[in-house]
Image: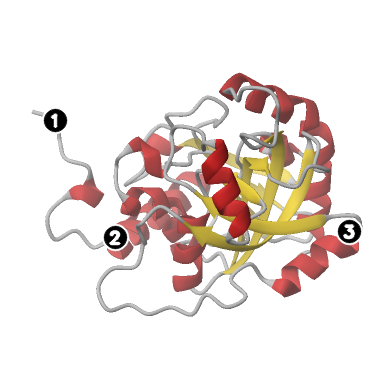
């Protein structure tokens, strides 16, 4: 009989489980506190090699509440990196997507573990579809806000969290001080795993969206609940359905990420160095 996942157990406290994970992470890395956390989505992984000195790399599945990622392009590790100024960054390469069907608690466990490990800044990145036609594949875009179309939330019970300025204008200003040409837009999270239909993309556009994808929004809400300041980046890997004349494919997403990786990784490393 398979052992139930700790976050799925009856009466499980997701914050207590995150605290256990943070303790195990400290033991495994030898780092008592991480100041910044980064979730590196499709195309962003190489930034981990540029932001500082790797102290330890831990298979995520060895830490309480984590499991191996289901998606090609995610490395499945938790990596502790010492930044040049002496702070420590936790690089999360083990994202659980909502479409995997494991529930919201597992989707946001990495964020809650980062908060329990001491991180006060959460950098969330992804590969996504662009609605603005001038965003060519390989364009990095700041996330200014989001629309959550998953019909779910990481908040449980009567928990009311203000999401005004969720994607910190202060941190976006820092990013633009590093790269003034950065554009920004509203990210729309769909449930997935199917790509959006052209009609759904037009709906997203009509309600104020500029970027479509299958991650990030639920994680950002959990980060705000945990008291973290959030910075979000999307790599535009393709024009969204109906905007692009070509059919969409995951291979296209991966290829665009590979081609853009050196440029966006350097950008993210410079932004991380500038974060307060």
Quarter assignment of residue 230: bottom right
Query: In the rendered image, which residue does mark 2 sit on?
Result: 14
Query: Going 25% across and 73% down the picture, which residue do you hit?
Result: 157
Label 3: element kind:
helix
User: Circle 1 sits on which residue?
Assistant: 2
User: Could you tell me how far apart the alpha carbons at marks 1 and 3 are, in whole angstroms?
Assistant: 49 Å
**Residue at figure coordinates x 15%, y 36% from the top left:** 3
Q: Which residue is mark 3?
A: 178
Badge nearest the viewer, 1 or 3? 3
Viewer-side residue, 202 vs 168: 202
Task: Say which label, 1 or 3, has the lower sequence index.
Answer: 1
Q: Position of residue 12 (x, y in %)?
A: 19, 58
Can the viewer see residue 91? no
Local SS, label 1: loop
- Of labels 2 and 1, earlier in sequence is 1
In terms of depth relative to the viewer, which is nearer, 243 or 238? 243
Q: How is the image coloured?
A: secondary structure
Mark 2 → mark 3, Cα distance in angstroms:
36 Å
Question: Gap in Å between the C-alphas at discs 2 and 1?
Answer: 20 Å
Seen from the viewer's position, the closer of residues 36 and 9 is 9
Residue 22 image offset from top left, x and y in percent = 42, 56
């Amino acid at each position: 009989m398979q052992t139930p996942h700790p976050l799925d157990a009856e009466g499980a406290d997701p914050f207590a489980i995150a605290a256990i994970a943070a303790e195990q992470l400290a033991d495994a890395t030898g780092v008592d506190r991480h100041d910044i956390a980064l979730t590196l989505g499709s195309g962003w992984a190489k930034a981990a090699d540029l932001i500082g000195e790797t102290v330890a790399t831990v298979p995520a599945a060895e830490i309480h509440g984590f499991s191996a990622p289901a998606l090609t392009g995610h490395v499945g590790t938790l990596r502790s990196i010492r930044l040049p100024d002496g702070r420590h960054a936790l690089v999360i390469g083990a994202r659980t997507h909502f479409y995997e069907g494991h529930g919201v608690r597992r989707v946001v466990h990495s964020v809650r573990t980062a908060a329990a490990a001491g991180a006060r800044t959460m950098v969330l990145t992804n590969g996504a579809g662009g609605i603005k036609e001038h965003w060519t594949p390989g364009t990095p875009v700041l996330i200014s806000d989001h629309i959550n179309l998953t019909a779910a939330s990481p908040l449980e019970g009567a928990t009311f969290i203000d999401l005004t300025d969720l994607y910190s204008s202060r941190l976006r200003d820092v990013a633009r001080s590093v790269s003034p040409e950065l554009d920004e837009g509203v990210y729309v999270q769909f449930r997935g795993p199917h790509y959006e239909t052209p009609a759904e993309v037009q709906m997203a556009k009509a309600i104020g969206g500029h970027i479509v994808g299958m991650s990030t929004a639920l994680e950002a809400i959990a980060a705000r609940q945990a008291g973290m300041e959030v910075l979000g980046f999307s790599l535009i890997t393709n024009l969204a359905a109906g905007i692009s004349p070509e059919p969409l494919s995951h291979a296209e997403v991966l290829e665009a990420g590979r081609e853009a990786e050196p440029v966006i990784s350097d950008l993210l490393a410079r932004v991380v160095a500038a974060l307060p």
